[in-house]
Image: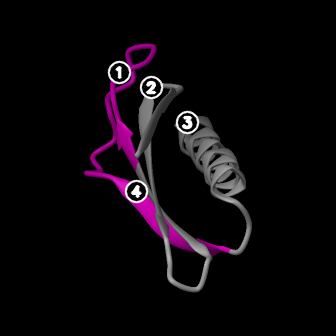
Amino acid sequence: METHEYRGYEITIDVERLASGRFLTELHIVPKARMDGIPIPQMPWLGCRRLHSTSRELAIVRTLVMSKCTIDEIVDRR
């Protein structure tokens, strides 16, 4: 399990290798702190599961980039 922090959100990525050799990533995005006096959005978490046919490291990088784009959209909408 990998944990990252980005723009006041905690990103948790869990990677599982399947019998087929593919990797399944499970992503959770949780608000961590208030930023610039803006209250934390009322959401328990956001997340998704994706199947990757690449290496474990590349699956993590792709998931992290996708999660940062999602967080950027959330923050920019405020």
67 vs 15: above or below:
above
Of residues 52 and 65, the one nearer the viewer is: 52
71 vs 51: above or below:
above
13 vs 48: above or below:
above
| Mark 2 or 3, nearer chain start | 2
Q: Secondary structure at mark 4?
A: strand
**Distance from the alpha carbon under mark 1 to that under mark 4:** 17 Å
Q: How is the image coloured?
A: one colour
| Mark 4 or 3, nearer chain start | 4
Q: Amino acid at mark 2?
A: Gly
Q: Residue at horizontal 32%, vertical 33%?
A: 40
Q: Bounds of the magenta span?
A: 29-52
Q: Which residue is mark 1?
A: 34
Neighbour tally class for label 3: few under 14, some 14-19, many 20 plus, Cα within 10 Å: some
| Mark 4 or 2, nearer chain start | 2
2 and 1 marks in contact (CB < 8 Å): yes
Q: Residue at horizontal 32%, vertical 28%?
A: 39
32 vs 27: above or below:
above
Res 75 label: 3
Q: Secondary structure at mark 2?
A: loop
